[in-house]
Amino acid sequence: MKKCFGQKNSLQKLVWQQCLPDVEDIFRQHASDRGLKVINYHVLLYGQSPPAA
């Protein structure tokens, strides 16, 4: 994690100290010899607003 976009340095340090170790543990649990398995999933959504009343 390189940046907390638009956040203060104090928040970035807090996230790194308190959250990153848990995230790293999860990555280690699911890692293989070749790294993490990544599945790319893309969805195209098409919507239309209802007509104005």
Image (cartoon, rainbow, N blue to C red):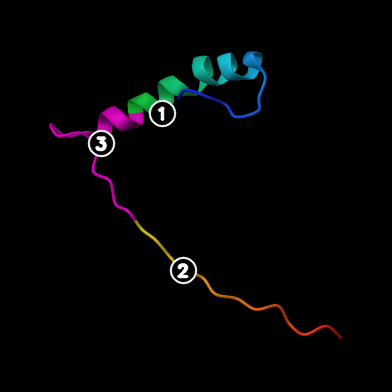
| Residues packed near mark 2 inside 10 Å, few (<14), some (14 to 19) or many (20 plus) | few
The residue located at (51%, 14%) in the rendering is 17
For label 3, the SS is helix
Q: Residue 25 versus residue 11: which sits nearer the camera?
A: 11
Residue 34 part of the magenta-drawn span: yes
Residue ID for mark 1: 23
Q: Quadrant of residue 31?
A: top left
Residue ID for mark 2: 44
Residue 35 at what x, y percent from top left?
A: 20, 33
Residue 7 at what x, y percent from top left?
A: 66, 24
Residue ID for mark 3: 30
25, above or below 36, in the image: above
Residue farthest to the left? Answer: 33
Q: Quadrant of the N terminus?
A: top left
Between label 1 and label 2, give the one nearer the viewer: 2
For label 2, the SS is loop
